[in-house]
Amino acid sequence: MRSPANLRVFNFLYFALLAMFISFLPVYLDAQGLAATEIGFIIGTGGFVSLFASPFWGMISDRTKTIRKVLLLLVACSTVAGYMLYASGSFLLLVAFTMLMYFFLLSMDPLTESLNFQTAEARGVSYGSIRTFGALGYAVMSLAVGYVMKLFGVEGMAPLFAVIGVISFFVVLTLADAPAASKPVKLKALGQFLSHRETLMFLVLIFMAAVPSRANDTYLGVYLRELGGGPELIGQAWFLAAGSEILVFALSFWWMRQGKEMALIAFASLFYFLRFFLSAWITDPHVLTYLQVLQIFTFPIFYTAAIQYLYRIVPDEWRATGQTVLALLFFGVSGIVASYAGGWLYETFSGHVYYLVISAVSCCAFLFSLALLAVYGKKQRTSPQEMRAS
């Protein structure tokens, strides 16, 4: 297998494209004059598309026994769709090309992660040494896009996306291939997985914490614009947020401890609450930008601990099902709720009320995590026999 250096480059480029799409699509839509409810509708509907798009492309990869060739197709289609999206102004075209981006670009994430895991295992290197470059790409591109928009306006996003997409395509050509490692979610396994009480309580907690997190992701840039911040501040905000994750992910082997996952989830939930509550009262866009450094205590800790907690409470044969459900819940279902409900809430009231509401939801997640910590925190990993019997 070839050196993972090229895969590190691809991770950097792919997450750079994600930064342009996830972080700056709401800003672009806002600049096109769309209302908050319209922005929420577009992004929320895209969430529905991603719920079936990722399993669809995973199945294609399974059938063809290749990840690289599927990635080539997805990168090519994403490049065209992304260029057209950021060159469009009409509502119908914005909806159409956004749906295509959710169908192509977002579907690359599980395939990329599968390739990362298999390459790391085959080359005897840590997964974090590869994935860290993704966080770096997200951070660097967030900063770069902010200044591109300041210098060239929102019109500068289309050619920038196309250039990064074309480079990504040629980098994928150099990657070593691997068969898809993901397993389809079978209804029987899903039913067994969801029938366990601890699992259900854990997923409820994930949903409670994910909705405000995704709500912030969707409307942070819009709120910064409302407070008078320019595109460079939006880029700086996402740079601080994504950049703070790099060290946390890289050192997860050091701070993550077996059996301490729920305590870490509670810790991250508390900082989610503090971050969003403070955001509601801040009126200076520069202060709100600097506040994003609190991401270091929220998402990377929460999600890493959530994955390890899930692996600790479920039998080995259900891990693939569990991780699929976790990802769809955190990035899919919660995003749909956050976009639809968040758009209505933001437009009906204000950014101040919006952040008060999502901070209240984060506070509920924190309190619920403390309850689960009291009940399940000291419990050892559930055996397959115990879980099937419960």
Image (cartoon, rainbow, N blue to C red):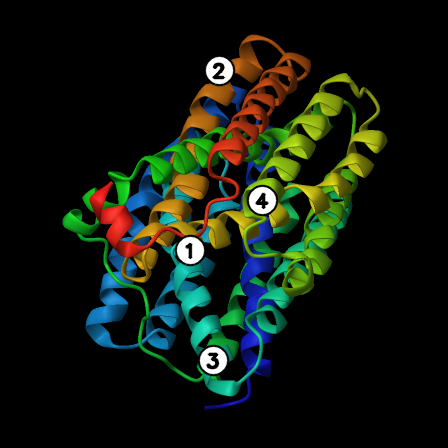
| Residue 150 location (% of width, % of height) | 76, 43
Mark 1 nearby-residue class (10 Å; few <14, some 14–19, many ≥20) = some
Q: Which residue in the rendered view is the most extreme toward the bottom? A: 1
Residue at image position (64%, 16%) is 356
Disc marking residue 121: 3
Give the quadrant of the C terminus: top left
Q: Earlier in the sequence, mark 3 or mark 4?
A: 3
The residue indicated by pointer 4 is 302
Q: How far apart are marks 1 and 2 (CA)?
A: 36 Å
Q: How far apart are marks 3 and 4 (CA)?
A: 25 Å
Distance, label 3 to label 2, CA atoms, is 45 Å
- The mark nearer the N terminus, 1 or 4, is 4
Q: Label 4: how many residues lie within 10 Å, few (<14), some (14-19) or many (20+)?
A: many
Quarter residue 353 falls in: top right
| Residue marked by disc 2 | 344
Pick whichever of labels 4 and 2 is earlier in the sequence. Answer: 4
Q: Which mark is residue 311?
A: 1
Pointers 1 and 3 in contact (CB under 8 A)? no
- Nearest to the eye among marks 1 and 3: give it: 1
Which of marks 3 and 1 precedes in the sequence?
3
The residue at the point 23 percent across, 62 percent down is 59
Q: Where is residue 192 in the image (x, y as percent from the top left)?
A: 21, 45
Mark 3: secondary structure: helix
The answer to whether residue 43 shows anywhere in this view is: no
Mark 3, Cα crowd under 10 Å, few <14 / some 14-19 / many 20+, is few
Disc 4 is placed on an element classified as: helix
Q: What residue type is labelled 3?
A: Glu
Q: Judge left or right: residue 326 versus residue 346.
A: left
